[in-house]
Image: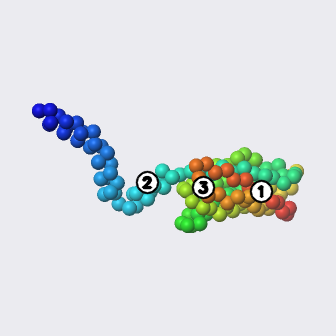
Amino acid sequence: MTRNRITRTISNRHAPRICVIIALLLCPSCLKSSYRESVCQLEIEFQYAFPDGVDAVDGLVTLEDYNTRREYKTSVRGTATTRVVVTRGFYSIRFNGIARSNGRLARVVALVEEHPAVGEHSRVTLKILSQWV
């Protein structure tokens, strides 16, 4: 009687863990990869260094993963810090937009001071260089 109770207790305790392992092993590769991507989504925070006289910038930040060529885009309005959620990887960053200064408009390009290898939380400073139209 005691031996049956011990066997039942052990099997009940390990059953959920074994089911999860079996489910992951039987899961198609596409489901595993999408699960992995959703778990590894991380946040990049952009801060902007404006040249003198620029009040605000409107534009688009594009991140491209070096390995998968997958692109993430986020819009920039005003002077606020922008955040974008991406998967873990190495990214090239492009910025295209328009700057406003005392009613004048400028075409804007950006230099990234550091190319992020996305970790737990990455902070990137975009140095905005303006060319007045």
Q: Residue furthest left?
A: 1
Q: Position of residue 53 (x, y in %)?
A: 87, 51
> Foreground residue, 42 or 9?
9
- In the rendered structure, which amino acid carries the disc numbered 2? Tyr
Q: Which residue is mark 2?
A: 35
Quadrant the C terminus occupies: bottom right
Q: Rate crowding at label 1 as few (under 14), some (14 to 19) or many (20 or more) other CA atoms within 10 Å.
A: some
Q: Which residue is mark 3?
A: 118
For residue 11, above or below residue 70:
above
Q: How many marks?
A: 3
Q: Position of residue 107 (x, y in %)?
A: 79, 62
N-terminal-most mark, 2 or 1: 2
For residue 70, above or below residue 7:
below
The Cα atoms of the two marked residues, 2 and 1, are separated by: 35 Å
N-terminal-most mark, 2 or 3: 2
Q: Position of residue 80 (x, y in %)?
A: 72, 46
Q: Is residue 25 left or right of residue 10?
A: right
State which quadrant residue 65 falls in: bottom right
For residue 77, above or below residue 95:
above
The Cα atoms of the two marked residues, 2 and 3, are separated by: 18 Å
Helix, strand, or loop for circle 3? loop
Query: In the drawing, what numbered circle is on residue 127?
Result: 1
